[in-house]
């Protein structure tokens, strides 16, 4: 494996080593780097020409050159050639995206979009070489938690997605993901909430349930989330949050339209928060959206656009326990 490492003089120096996995190559680069910031580019991916400059400018704008920066990113689906951009701010508030523990826990980060001050590797060490698939997110959680990140709402990375990637072919990945997410869940601390807008750990675990329920990528850690929700006291302001959520969805001043195809999932998440959908909530098929005649104060929302509201509203513990003991909960 040949690893490029940026040098202070502005040139590029190459180091060659036997293939020992991604972590060993990254650690070799970190060991030999002489600059102030770390940024890597995988052989499948492409930097936008302005990537580093935009991120340095973002640090200058916030007035703190010691923070970590990351950005939107785009994926190039091969062989179709279709480009899709991930913009976290379409689903999450900025404070979520810039909360150090949440960025890896909720899967926000494309590693090549990062710009990391070198001193953080001096403090936390390099990547764990015993992992072959999740060494990056393990390090991000260790390194970023308790810190405020900087999120740039601009796509600075183009990542090629194809069938040959380790991400898709490496069989041990499932086992490593199981360990990683359970480890992150159990190591969360109330200090990890600072700046996120959430009030307590119960609220955070409820948010994780909302984010990952029904998602095969995360469901092997699902029992641990359930255990945490059942162990922790309910959010002290849950009643007020549910009332606010109910007023937003069922307000008399506007009608809300949801996709018919997502009706079961939407009703499920609302019911666990004690919100009964009113008569102004309508479900219509996706194919009818284009012909939907919206008037003032009407809105059409998908379940993804509702995630932020759902995260702000804790799951009701009693209702969750009832669901867990039901046939549907046992099947899940």
Image (tube, grey):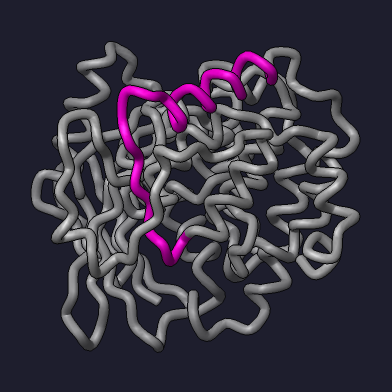
Magenta stretch: includes residue 59: no
Looking at the picture, tell me which residue is in the foreground, 318 or 111: 318
Q: Is residue 43 above or below residue 164?
A: above
| Magenta region, residue range | 238-262
Magenta stretch: includes residue 242: yes
Expressed as whole percent of the image width and height from the top left, the position of residue 91 reads 38, 41
Lateral position of residue 36 relative to residue 19, left or right: left
Question: How many dots with numbers?
Answer: 0
Expressed as whole percent of the image width and height from the top left, the position of residue 18 reads 49, 79
The residue under the point 38% across, 24% down is: 252
The residue under the point 28% across, 11% down is: 63
The residue under the point 45% across, 32% down is: 249
Expressed as whole percent of the image width and height from the top left, the position of residue 190 reads 72, 21
Looking at the rendering, which quadrant does residue 3 occupy? bottom left
Quadrant (top left, top right, bottom left, bottom right) of the N terminus: bottom left
Most prominent secondary structure in the magenta stretch? helix
Lateral position of residue 274 relative to residue 311, left or right: right
Expressed as whole percent of the image width and height from the top left, the position of residue 121 reads 52, 38
The residue under the point 29% across, 65% down is: 286
Using the rendered image of the protein, determine whether residue 34 is visible from the camera's viewpoint.
no
Looking at the picture, tell me which residue is in the foreground, 39 or 206: 206
Q: Is residue 226 above or below residue 285?
A: above
Looking at the picture, tell me which residue is in the foreground, 43 or 70: 70
Extreme-front residue of the structure? 279
Lateral position of residue 129 relative to residue 4, left or right: right
Quadrant (top left, top right, bottom left, bottom right) of the C terminus: bottom right
Using the rendered image of the protein, determine whether residue 97 is visible from the camera's viewpoint.
yes
């Amino acid at each position: 494996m040949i690893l490029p490492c940026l040098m202070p003089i502005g040139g590029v120096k190459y180091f060659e080593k036997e293939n020992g996995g991604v972590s060993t190559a990254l650690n070799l680069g970190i060991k030999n780097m002489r600059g102030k910031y770390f940024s890597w580019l995988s052989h499948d991916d492409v930097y936008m020409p302005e990537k580093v400059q935009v991120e340095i400018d973002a640090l200058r704008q916030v007035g703190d050159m010691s923070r970590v920066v990351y950005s939107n990113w785009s994926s190039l689906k091969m062989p179709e050639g279709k480009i899709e951009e991930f913009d976290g701010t379409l689903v999450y508030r900025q404070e979520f995206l810039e909360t150090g523990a949440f960025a890896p826990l909720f899967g926000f980060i494309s590693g090549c979009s990062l710009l990391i001050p070198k001193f953080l590797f001096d403090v936390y060490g390099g990547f764990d070489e015993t992992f072959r698939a999740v060494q990056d997110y393990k390090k991000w959680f260790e390194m970023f938690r308790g810190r405020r990140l900087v999120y740039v709402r601009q796509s600075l990375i183009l990542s090629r997605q194809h069938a040959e990637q380790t991400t898709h072919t490496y069989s041990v990945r499932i086992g490593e993901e199981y360990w990683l997410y359970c480890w992150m869940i159990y190591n969360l601390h109330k200090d990890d909430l600072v700046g996120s807008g959430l009030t307590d750990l119960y609220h955070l675990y409820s948010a994780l349930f909302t984010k990952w329920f029904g998602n095969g990528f995360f469901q092997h850690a699902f029992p641990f989330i359930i255990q945490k929700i059942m162990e922790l006291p309910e959010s002290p302001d849950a009643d007020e949050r549910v009332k606010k959520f109910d007023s937003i969805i069922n307000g008399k001043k506007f009608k809300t339209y949801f996709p018919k195809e997502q009706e079961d999932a939407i009703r499920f998440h609302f019911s666990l928060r004690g919100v009964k959908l009113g008569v102004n909530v309508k479900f219509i098929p996706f194919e009818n959206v284009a012909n939907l005649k919206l008037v003032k104060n009407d809105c059409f929302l998908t379940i993804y656009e509702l995630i932020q509201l759902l995260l702000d509203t804790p799951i009701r513990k009693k209702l969750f326990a009832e669901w867990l003991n039901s046939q549907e909960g046992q099947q899940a």
